[in-house]
Image (tube, rainbow, N blue to C red):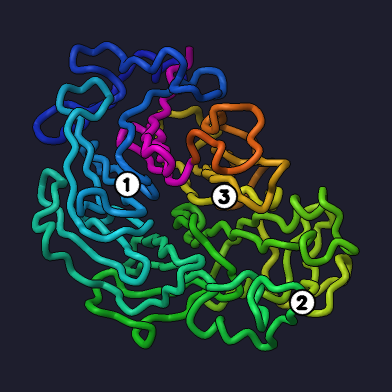
Amino acid sequence: MANQLKSSCFWGVALGVALASCNPDGSKIAADADNAGLTLPKGFEALKVADSIGAARHIAVGSKGGIFVKLQRPVDSKGIIVLSDTDGDGRADVQSGFGDYGGTGIAIKDGFLYASSNSEVFRYALDENEEVRNPMAPDTIVSGLIDRGQHNSKSIALDGVGNIYVNIGAYSNVCQEKDRTYGSPGMQPCPILDSAGGIWRFKADGMKQGYGDGLRYATGLRNVVGLDWNPQAGALFVMQHGRDNLHDFYPEMYDSETGVDLPSEAMYRLSEGSDAGWPYIYYDQHQKKKIVNPEYGGDGKREGGVDVLDPVVAFPGHMAPNALLFYTGELFPARYKNGAFVAFHGSWNRSPNQRGYMVAFVPFENGQPSGDWEVFASGFAGADTVAAPGDAKHRPCGLAQGPDGSLYVSDDVTGAIYRILYTGE
């Protein structure tokens, strides 16, 4: 496969122009001289497709090469940016936009572009060139979702059989009577779980759906920014952001080193009715156990959550997984096929021992993880040591697969869009 890819090109057409892993004259697209500042496995190269477009959250790339970027906050009343490459050199040279709302989620499926604000999900019809037909008048698929500021991004995924899954994050750290307050006990049962702290499923072609029209597909998830449908497994996988403040509030149980590394940032495989256990338990990747949270009587060792999910992958804590993508392309070597890429954004609660600011890879086989996770792309932060998230030059946030099998990564600090290619050289 690798030998074939070194001498072959994938061609697509957008706006009447060839878009590919090669230039129109057949030569390979040139990576940036320094691979856009990234460190990658041997045989991979990278370039910046665009920069300074705004706080770029999730991204979607159409089958004809058009790039759609959801901005956290609109720029000049445009919350969705469209990037086009009209000369085929792999870099965007035309930028347009629409949608006067901020948010995170964006996806393309079956001739429609889906995008979310922090309380709604919209749908735009695409024409034969994958351009939005009527950018000023989208369908409102879902509205009225709770937004209380904390963990309010409504990330989305589609399953290919007519359903859309929406994260509704918990507006709390661990469902205390007084949120993020030392000594405040956890509420039992947690009332937040009625309308948040889980994944809701709606019809992808429904109109103006609300909570009553959807299904609480999975619960016990503090906040999921990264989620994707795994076509090989036929299941939804999600990345949970773990709780904060273990050392801050309970230094007698958790020293500073343990406090920054717990709890695990966990990947779950969901099915209808799944419960991941938040706020009552967290997953300790070192003990490989589900541990009762201190707010509910835990001591750092007491196990709980007998009837709730175990993660399928357990990463170190406080790295903030903001995107999950199952790779189905042919450009990368065979070991990457059907595996999972995860974009780690970096978290304030890991200071001063910062980790994250990278894209990880998890090999999969037959719809399940088949090996340990590894760092795939690093260097986004621009320095080996980052004292706090604000010091990072770039923070990975979104992932998308191009029609040629390229991997795209968005950055919500400067609004850079990276493209990672495999050349085998």
Name the image quarter holding residue 133: bottom left
Q: How far, Cα to Cα, is label 2 from label 1?
A: 39 Å
What residue is disc 3 on? Answer: 366
Q: Is residue 384 left or right of residue 49?
A: right
Please report the bounds of the magenta region as a residue range.
Answer: 396-425
Q: Alpha-carbon neighbours of circle 2 within 10 Å: few (<14), some, or many (≥20)?
A: many
Question: What amino acid does circle 1 point to?
Answer: Ala
Q: How far, Cα to Cα, is label 3 from label 1?
A: 25 Å
- Membership of 299 in magenta stretch: no
* Front-most of residues 328 and 340: 340
Tell me where residue 33 appears, x and y as whole percent.
42, 12
Rendered-image quadrant of the N terminus: top left
Q: Alpha-carbon neighbours of circle 1 within 10 Å: few (<14), some, or many (≥20)?
A: many
| Depicted 404 relative to depicted 282: above or below | above
Total number of numbered discs in the rendering: 3
- Membership of 410 in magenta stretch: yes
Question: Circle 2 — which element?
Answer: helix
What residue is disc 1 on? Answer: 60
Kindly tell me whether residue 139 is visible in this rendering.
yes
Q: Which numbered disc, 2 or 1, marks the residue that appears first in the sequence?
A: 1
What residue is disc 2 on? Answer: 295
Q: Which numbered disc, 3 or 1, marks the residue that appears first in the sequence?
A: 1
Q: Name the mark on residue 92.
A: none
Kindly identify the residue that appears in the image at 43 percent across and 18 percent down. Answer: 423
* Front-most of residues 365 and 193: 193
* Front-most of residues 281 and 29: 281
For marks 3 and 1, give the one nearer the viewer: 1
Q: Alpha-carbon neighbours of circle 3 within 10 Å: few (<14), some, or many (≥20)?
A: few
For marks 2 and 1, give the one nearer the viewer: 2
Kindly identify the residue that appears in the image at 58 percent across and 72 percent down. Answer: 172
Name the image quarter holding residue 252: bottom right
